[in-house]
Image (cartoon, rainbow, N blue to C red):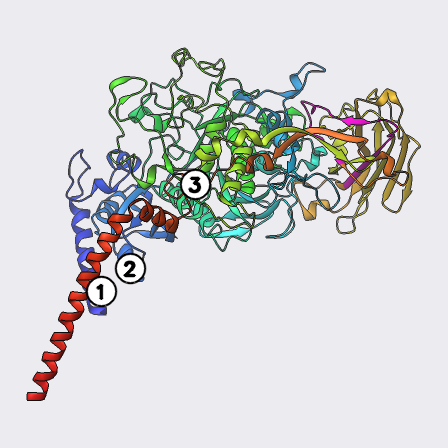
């Protein structure tokens, strides 16, 4: 065996020597010293432009898992193995172009692609991001909480949940149950996350309520670290939009999946394709069905490079495997290259990885979600598979800011050390990442849609007409596995809002006249409007959650978490899902309502005092008619031995929102907790009470624990209880503030509550009515028709309908069987007689 291996190595070395002496440039046709059919476009361009001695890093795939003998052969080709990628049977090598040509001829090599630096799709403020400090006094700023309203995440959070049995669902503390993503983990695969930020609550690996794991790729492996975003800052901002809890702002700037968990994977600055591939491999390994303890089901990717779909590339291969094998929703930014829609083939503007059919491609819309941004990449109008799938706000998105990074340095003039506003498809994508977490959390059965395939033009484009879709064709597109999409994508496309967005473009793109979509829009395979700018339109979290949950109820009809009816599809749920979104009035057996929140005070929260930096942490609570008493419990950890921190903070309460502190001199303190008990008169009814935390603190050793977020920070909780006079009926109903999200929940009644008050307090609120949907579910057989009782029932019906034929066939069968038995008996007798003669 060893002698055979030496012979193989000797043959390879001789071939390499021949190549070194006779290296020829790569031509358009066949090259005897390089198999160009195994190479991606970027690598071919490199071969054409570079000389034989140029060093390159190349990602390779073999046609079966790599062995120790393969490693020796790679070394014999004079290539250095830098890393391995087991899921794609390959890895990363470095060598000269001459040696690479030789490697391409090895029969074990299936595909080669150039490892190059990826783009992160954001625009610094100097390229179009608005500076909040330039806003006129009193003008509403550009805040994260605004875009959670725009995509209707706040509408979804606010709905009461009615069980399939018709009962309102409550938590153990009597508060209404809400669907906020808690229980599903979303991977933020980016430059990393500074999980020392108060909005991420990082404790130790695989514990905690928010970021449960943070790691950085060092070129060889993933190393756990609290701050995996040390010099870019891009991933920290993205993570806040996905699922930040908003602690540094008193809950104001929470992300879309505000209750969800997050995994932060830092590919490093100047990240390469291979580093991203390793991140997807990590995600695959930690999302394997049956071994997915943290329910890792989404990966958000705000990076890539422009180009068309490459089914052989490692990122496309892993996107498919994550989708089809593990049911993970893979989301990509569409890119920031703008364009007009006329750029096709070599000039395509959209992200090559977003163009993978199984991926969800996200366009960037304006802050209010009414138009496509100037920078958002347009797909080739004559190739539907290059169009974005959906859109989300990507202009001036305010989210978590890292410290000591390039982005942080460029946004300090905005005046906030905890949040910053930047733009890009990178900022739109995490909105959809958070939405996907919400959908899968309420419908864990969501997976690949076997009955719907990505749109694709064949020869004759629906836009350009005959012969205009001549490039990028795939003959098996309508039947191939690789053209299937995730059910999350289909749900987002069906529920997106397109009306009014055709030919609606932000100023600033001179390439796009934005006037070429007809009144009757272009229709995708969903039956809904679709174009190369905004995809299917602005995503609607509220409707998408309702549709996803409807499908889950159809598949799991007994609610035990097991899928009993996989035959139901998104299309079935689409027919009835709107019945879930209702408004309901709930009768409450209490005279008290409550609201709670937590935060992380710092001295930049002390109001707009003229200081250079300020972080808004105001909180609001609705005061219903009939409220006679407000009690507030404020608990803060003012002293901390490890960091040498000491401080004093207090809660300010403005009942009429007139600028006065109604809690001044009213509180009493026990240990670390302040108690406030305020009388409320009718002048405060029907308004928002304003709460703020102010104080002072000093920290001696904070820089030792966290060199970035080293200032004094005091975590706190606030619990507000409102007691209502119920001498007459009171109904509570209010609209959310456009700049904030706040709810009220029933809590245990006061001591004066008695039976005469039963039903006097009601609450009118939006609801997800699962009971209404369950009543509409119709039986369905596996073959798509109505369920007629199963196989045996069908067989009985067939016998009943064809009784005479069945009897005739049975008689024939009986006759045949009798003949066979008689014949076999005669043969047996002949054999016995023969044996006796012998």
In this image, 477 relative to 274: left or right? Answer: left
> Mark 2 touching mark 1, by CB under 8 A?
yes
- Classify 10 Å Cα crowding around label 2: few (below 14), some (14-19), many (20 and above): some
Label 1 or label 3, whichever lies nearer to me, is 3
**Residue 748 relative to residue 199: left or right:** right
Q: Is residue 205 above or below residue 117?
A: below
Q: Is residue 21 left or right of residue 403?
A: left
**Dot 2 or dot 3, earlier in sequence:** 2
What secondary structure is found at the residue carrying circle 1? helix
**x and y percent of residue 371 in the render?**
50, 17
The residue that mark 3 highlights is: 780
Instruction: Mark yes or no: residue 168 visible.
Output: yes
Label 1, label 3: how far apart the Cα atoms are: 60 Å
What residue do we see at 29% from left, 17% from top? 464
Picture quarter with the N terminus? bottom left
Residue 728: image quadrant is top right
Residue 458 in the image: state x and y as whole percent: 26, 26
Which residue is the site of mark 1? 5
Q: Nearer the viewer, residue 702 or 640?
A: 640
Q: Which mark sits nearer the N-terminus, 1 or 3?
A: 1
Disc 2 versus disc 3: nearer the observer:
3
From the image, tell me which residue sits under label 2: 72
């Amino acid at each position: 065996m060893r002698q055979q291996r030496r012979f193989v190595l000797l043959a390879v070395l001789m071939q390499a020597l021949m190549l070194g002496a006779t290296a020829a440039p790569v031509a358009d046709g066949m090259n005897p010293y390089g198999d160009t059919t195994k190479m991606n476009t970027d690598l071919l361009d490199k071969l054409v432009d570079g000389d034989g001695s140029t060093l390159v890093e190349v990602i390779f795939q073999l046609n079966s898992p790599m062995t120790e003998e393969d490693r020796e052969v790679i070394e014999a080709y004079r290539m250095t193995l830098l890393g391995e990628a087991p899921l794609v049977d390959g890895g990363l090598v470095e060598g000269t172009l001459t040696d690479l040509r030789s490697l391409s001829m090895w029969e074990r090599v299936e595909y080669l692609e150039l490892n190059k630096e990826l783009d992160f799709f954001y625009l610094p403020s100097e390229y179009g991001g608005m500076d909040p400090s330039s806003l006129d006094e009193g003008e509403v700023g550009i805040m994260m909480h605004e875009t959670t309203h725009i995509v209707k995440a706040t509408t979804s959070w606010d709905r009461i949940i009615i069980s399939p049995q018709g009962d309102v669902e409550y938590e153990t503390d009597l508060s209404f149950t809400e669907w906020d993503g808690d229980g599903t983990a979303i991977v933020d695969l980016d430059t990393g996350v500074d999980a020392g930020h108060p909005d991420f609550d990082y404790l130790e690996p695989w514990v905690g309520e928010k970021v449960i794991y943070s790691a950085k790729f060092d070129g060889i492996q993933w190393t756990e670290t609290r701050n995996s975003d040390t010099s870019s800052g891009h991933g920290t901002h993205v993570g806040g939009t996905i699922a930040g809890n908003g602690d540094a702002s008193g809950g104001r700037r929470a992300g879309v999946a505000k209750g969800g968990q997050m995994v932060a994977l830092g590919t490093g600055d100047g990240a390469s394709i291979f580093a991203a591939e390793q991140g997807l491999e990590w995600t695959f390994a930690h999302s394997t069905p049956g071994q997915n303890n943290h329910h890792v089901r989404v990966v958000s990717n705000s990076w890539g490079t422009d180009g068309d779909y490459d089914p052989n590339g490692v990122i496309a291969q892993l996107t498919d495997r994550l989708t089809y094998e593990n049911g993970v929703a893979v989301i990509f930014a569409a890119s920031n290259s703008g364009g007009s829609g006329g750029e096709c083939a070599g000039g395509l503007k959209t992200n090559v990885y977003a163009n993978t059919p199984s991926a969800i491609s996200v366009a960037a819309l304006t802050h209010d979600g009414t138009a496509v941004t100037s920078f958002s990449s347009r797909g080739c109008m004559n190739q539907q598979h290059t169009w974005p799938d959906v859109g989300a706000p990507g202009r001036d998105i305010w989210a978590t800011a890292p410290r000591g990074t390039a982005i942080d340095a460029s946004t300090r003039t905005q005046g906030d050390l905890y949040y910053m506003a930047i733009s890009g498809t990178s900022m739109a994508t995490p909105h959809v990442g958070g939405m996907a977490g919400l959908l899968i959390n309420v419908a864990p059965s969501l997976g690949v849609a076997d009955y719907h395939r990505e749109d694709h033009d064949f020869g004759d484009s629906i836009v350009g007409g005959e012969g205009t879709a001549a490039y990028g064709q795939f003959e098996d597109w309508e039947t191939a596995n690789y053209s299937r999409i995730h059910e999350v994508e289909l749900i987002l496309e069906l529920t997106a809002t397109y009306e009014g967005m055709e030919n609606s473009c932000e100023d600033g793109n001179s390439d796009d006249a934005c006037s070429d979509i007809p009144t009757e829009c272009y229709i995708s395979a969903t039956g809904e409007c679709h174009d190369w700018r905004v995809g299917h339109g602005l995503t609607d979290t509220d409707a998408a959650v309702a549709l996803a949950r409807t499908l889950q109820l159809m598949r799991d009809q007994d609610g035990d978490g097991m899928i009993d009816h996989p035959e139901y599809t998104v299309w079935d749920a689409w027919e009835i899902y709107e019945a879930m979104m209702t408004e309901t009035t709930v009768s409450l057996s209490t005279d008290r309502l409550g609201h709670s929140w937590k935060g992380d005070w710092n001295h930049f929260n002390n109001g707009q005092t003229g200081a250079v930096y300020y972080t808004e942490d105001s909180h609001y609570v609705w005061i219903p008619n009939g409220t006679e008493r407000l009690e507030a419990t404020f608990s803060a950890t003012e002293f901390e031995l490890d960091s040498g921190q000491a401080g004093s903070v207090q809660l300010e309460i403005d009942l009429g929102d007139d600028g006065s502190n109604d809690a001044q001199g009213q509180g009493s303190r026990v240990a670390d907790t302040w108690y406030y008990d305020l009388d409320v008169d009718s002048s405060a009814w029907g308004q928002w009470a304003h709460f703020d935390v102010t104080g002072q603190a000093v920290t001696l050793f904070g820089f030792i624990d966290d060199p970035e977020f080293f200032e004094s920070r005091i975590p706190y909780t606030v619990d507000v209880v409102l007691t209502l006079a119920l001498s007459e009926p009171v109904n509570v109903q209010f609209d959310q503030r456009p700049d904030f999200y706040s709810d009220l929940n029933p809590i245990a009644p006061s001591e004066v509550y008695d039976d005469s008050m039963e039903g006097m307090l009601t609450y009118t609120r939006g609801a997800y009515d699962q009971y209404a949907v369950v009543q509409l579910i119709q039986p369905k057989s596996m073959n798509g028709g109505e369920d007629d009782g199963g196989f045996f029932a069908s067989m009985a019906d067939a016998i009943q309908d064809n009784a005479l034929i069945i009897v005739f066939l049975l008689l024939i069968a009986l006759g045949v069987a009798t003949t066979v038995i008689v014949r076999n008996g005669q043969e047996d007798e002949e054999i016995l007689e023969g044996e006796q003669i012998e």
